[in-house]
Image (tube, rainbow, N blue to C red):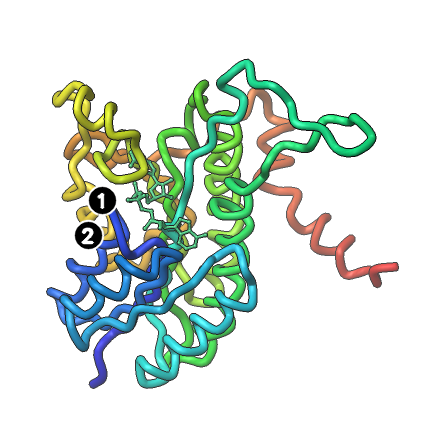
Amino acid sequence: MSQPVAVITGAASGMGLAVTKHLVANGWRVAMADIDGDSGRKIGTEIGDQVLFCLTDVTSYAQQASLFEKAFSWGGRRLDLFAANAGIADTQFLHENDYNHDEKGLPLPLSLKALDVNLTAVLQGVWLFKYYARRNKVAGGKIVITSSSAGLYPMETNPIYTASKHALVGLTRALGPVLQRQNIQVNTICPAFVPTALCPKEMLDRFPKEHVTPISTVIKAYDTFLHDDSICGQTVELSLDKLYFRTKPDYPNESQRWLGEESASFWEEAYKAPVS
Ligand SMILES: NC(=O)c1ccc[n+]([C@@H]2O[C@H](COP(=O)([O-])OP(=O)(O)OC[C@H]3O[C@@H](n4cnc5c(N)ncnc54)[C@H](O)[C@@H]3O)[C@@H](O)[C@H]2O)c1
């Protein structure tokens, strides 16, 4: 039987790299995608034939589509796992900054790059993975999305990052049951502080050791998802060495519970109507 194949975005550093190495050590082949070509190519060569480095900016749909196409054919026409892991921080609201202006003197817009990388690119990746997962010998596969503690709690220094990571939690909860019917299990990890290149250097030096979540906890979460097909649509908070499965918020009354859990048939019926 051929080896299982993964696509991992943001694979040239931090968690993506750690997961890549873990999977390779366990007999997987990994298409490593990253925008950092220098590191990615170097690391890819060091790891060897079990990986294929693909220079990819995930915010480009064309580049992500090409990544999946390459991975699928390199992997022997199979794709078992998509780790939607690439992410960037955003601190634009943190400082009392001077606005730049356009030629009419109007303030230039915020950069929404963090939404593009952390959210839009994940959606496009999930869309692409679903396409290839249907073409597997046995249709289906697994998706692990990297959200954050900031997907569950507000991170005041990073409001746009917080918005993007909260969105991934909602996405996973909504998509979980739908994709499970297609034999695709999608789950999201919400790591606490993991020392990686995403964090400013001063943070890495000064961060209290007792509040550091090791990358081994991330690996533990992946192993949990990979070994249990019944886990789907779950949000898992990673803190220190523990995984905490987080359920959606409680309903405040019976009406909201009905809306959340029993109104699906109304929506499905309504959405059957032709879209004008
Ligand atoms: N480090 C933490 O404390 C922490 C906590 C919670 C969640 N996260 C999330 O974990 C994920 C992995 O981050 P990390 O901590 O390993 O950071 P990292 O900076 O070490 O790795 C992120 C990788 O993503 C790549 N990347 C960035 N933009 C890209 C793009 N447009 N296209 C392709 N690749 C791109 C970077 O080049 C880098 O190699 C991110 O989604 C991050 O938001 C990190």
Q: Quadrant of ligand 1?
A: top left
- Would you name the residue on which mark 1 appears? 218
Q: Type of residue at label 2?
A: Ala
Would residue 165 appear left or right of 6 to someone viewing this image?
right
Which x, y percent locates residue 199? 30, 32
Identify which residue is drawn at 53% across, 31% down.
160
Identify which residue is drawn at 55% across, 47% down.
116
- Residues under labels 2 and 1: Cα distance? 9 Å
Identify which residue is drawn at 35% across, 56% down.
36
Q: Quadrant of residue 139?
A: bottom left
Would residue 275 appear left or right of 176 to someone viewing this image?
right
Q: Quadrant of the N terminus?
A: bottom left
Q: Is residue 67 above or below residue 229?
A: below
Looking at the rendered image, the disc whose residue lies closer to the viewer, 2 or 1, is 2
Q: Type of residue at label 1?
A: Val
Which x, y percent locates residue 232? 39, 52
Label 2 SS: helix
Q: Quadrant of residue 11?
A: bottom left
Label 2–label 1 contact, CB within 8 A: yes
Identify which residue is drawn at 49% across, 48% down.
117
Query: In this view of the protein, which residue sits in the foreground, 26 or 162?
Result: 162
Would residue 122 appear left or right of 241 to someone viewing this image?
right
**From the Cβ of disc 2, is ligand 1 less than 8 Å away?**
yes
Label 1 SS: helix
Q: Earlier in the sequence, mark 2 or mark 1?
A: 2
Residue neighbourhood size for the residue with mark 2, other residues' Cα within 10 Å, grouped as few (<14), some (14–19), many (≥20): some
Q: Quadrant of the C terminus?
A: bottom right
Name the disc covering residue 18, or none.
2
